[in-house]
Image (cartoon, coloured by chain):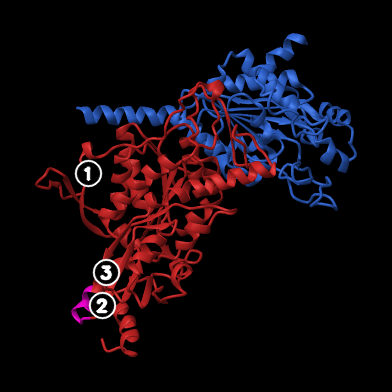
Chain colours: A blue, B red
Amino acid sequence: MGTQLSEIHEYLRWRKRFPTVWCAGCGDGTIMGAILRAIHDLQMPQDSIAFISGIGCSSRMPIYLDFNTLHTTHGRALPFATGVKLVRPDMNVIVVSGDGDALAIGGNHFIHTCRRNIDITMVLINNSIYGMTGGQVAPTTPIGAIAHTMPYGNIDPPFDAVELSLAAGATFVARSTTYNIIQTTNYIKKALQHKGFSFVEIISQCPVLYGRLNGMPDPVDMLLWQKEVAVPLSKAKKMSPEELEGKITTGIFRDEIRPEYTEQVYALSEKLQEKSED
Amino acid sequence: MALNRTTSDGHPVRFVQGNEAVVLGALHSGCRFFGGYPITPSTEIAEGMARELPKVGGVFIQMEDEIASIASIIGASAAGAKSMTATSGPGFSLMQENLGFAYITQLPIVIVNVQRGGPSTGLPTKLAQSDTMQARWGTHGDYTAVVLAASSVQESYEATIRAFELAEKLSTPVIVLLDELIGHMREKLILRMKKDIKEIRRPFPKVPPEWYFPYDIPNDYTAHPAPFGEGFRYSITGLVHDRTGFPTSVPSEVIERLDALREKIITHRKEIWNWKEYEVTDAKYLIVAYGSAARAARGAVAILRKKRIKAGFLELKSIWPFPDGPLMSAAKQAKYVFVAENNMGQLIHAVRENIRHTINVIPINRYDGHPLEPEQIVYFIKEEVYGHSTV
């Protein structure tokens, strides 16, 4: 444990920015640790990383991290990241987003960034609710769940972010949970190594709002719920739709190579510049 | 770009649209990133950049909407590129939130708004100057805008170059307001020679990373955040932040930040101001206008002077911060000031704010999608001179 702590420590702005805004029992810190362990294992230089977010609890993450950090406007992290990556293709661009940030206000940017297959890694922290504004319904809140703007039970059908990213053309897609943090770390590592748009959804917990409103006020209850509903992809393939009702499939859903956007932009530019020199 | 000649002293000459002049001005300024979304009447700017940027190693990207367009150019600016977008009313509305982000984070960008009629979808193919106040007040929160204007193809080129200079120098978003008439009209354009273009670029930090305060407040109030990936790892946020770039809500630090953002533009206002006077020294009747309305105003002065009416004209080539000094000086002899605009009266508020106590300020407006004509301005002025008009 001791060595693990020091590994992460060098990536934190620990002198300046702690404690975090996150509540006790929140999954954001666990996931931040997973991201940092993945970065550390891959020996990615801190200067090479642009860490970008929008607005929300999880989007506060860049403030705590010693990288080139850009904390942008609600839902817009991906187009900001696109600008950074296109100017500095040599940098490793990482976006962290909440479910409201990525799938509601930022839904348009999400599908289009998947489509372009630009080399950005996106970690979506899905806690099924709006945390920072105090527990309103999210595009990921399950049907029937209680939220402060769905006081009689949610009637809005939720998005499946994995299905959405697959349909939109992301070339690396994975899902895990904060309960299974070793698997989560491995998926993030794979995503960071992937050339193209890589997307990792992590089912997280908000015991203070989602949990309290839905009968799981203890963070441990929420983690046990994750353990119960998570079904590995290999197992899920053998299950019937009825058996999968209420379950969350985890695993790597896609890992393929297609032409990457930044490379194509620069290849075209080089071709045109050679032409003008002739 | 059919006509390819040079002036006697070697300057290349083109016969192009205002929108094409913007493209040339941006390229000559070292703009290397354009993120945009098609919208009439600004689309030729995006098309020109898509054609030309890859040839100079720059990047063009058509984003999914105008919100993403401005976000992408701010990201590009954080990575160190001179970047711009171009749009018109509806797209400009969508950009307002992130315009404030670029302002508070002091990341230089250039936005060209080729104005069309509004509100809403309005008159996509007709001219208007009805975003004059939106350019000043559009984003939420206390904000100080830098807005330039142009009334010809040549000026569109010059204003774009100036916009990049000011954006880089002041590390702030700079808006260029054109209108449909200026964007689409074709005129002669004399290009600058390479040697005459001194490319202004934001200064790189002079201190090592461990001493670096990205949002320090120096004497000229201007912070120049270092480009990403150069060893200066720091925090950029749209939250109010202290000198280190980290969020703060300590009242004294909030006041210090908001004051510095305003002061940096106010203290540089004389550098930003740009105007031209026509026959103002003895003018009892002064016209104030910018953009396509300025073309009509110049014509009106010529007609009125022939009739021995002492008319003059102050053309504003920068609008915000409002050039109050040049206005006061041009209006010294004036009994009446006429503000000619292709809208229902916007710039007139700034004019009134400065001189209403001493001089009558009279609006001349046209907002049917067509340009003001010199005769229309003459008509209004003669009404004041004679009590009635006999054009």
Residue B121: x percent and y percent? 48, 64
Start-end of magenta stretch = B302-308
Question: Of marks 1 and 3, which one's residue comes earlier in the chain?
Answer: 1
Question: How much space separates mark 2 and mark 1, taking CA atoms?
Answer: 36 Å
Residue B243: x percent and y percent? 59, 34
Question: Of marks 2 and 1, which one's residue comes earlier in the chain?
Answer: 1
Instruction: Indicate the chain on which mark 3 is placed.
Output: B
Crowdedness near tag 1: few (<14), some (14–19) or many (≥20) residues, C-alpha within 10 Å:
some
Q: Report the label total.
A: 3
- Would you say the residues marked 2 and 1 are in contact, meaning their CB atoms lie under 8 Å apart? no
Left or right: B146 as drawn, with respect to B17: right
Residue type highlighted by circle 2: Lys
B147 vs A228, nearest the viewer = B147
The image quadrant that residue B55 belongs to is top left
Q: Residue at x 81, y 33 (%)?
A: A243
In the rendered image, which residue does mark 2 sit on? Answer: B310
Q: Residue at x 29, y 79 (%)?
A: B378
Is residue A123 positioned above or below B122 on the image? above
Left or right: A261 as drawn, with respect to B286: right
Crowdedness near tag 3: few (<14), some (14–19) or many (≥20) residues, C-alpha within 10 Å:
some
Crowdedness near tag 2: few (<14), some (14–19) or many (≥20) residues, C-alpha within 10 Å:
some
In the rendered image, which residue does mark 3 sit on? Answer: B281
Residue type highlighted by circle 3: Thr
Label 1 SS: loop
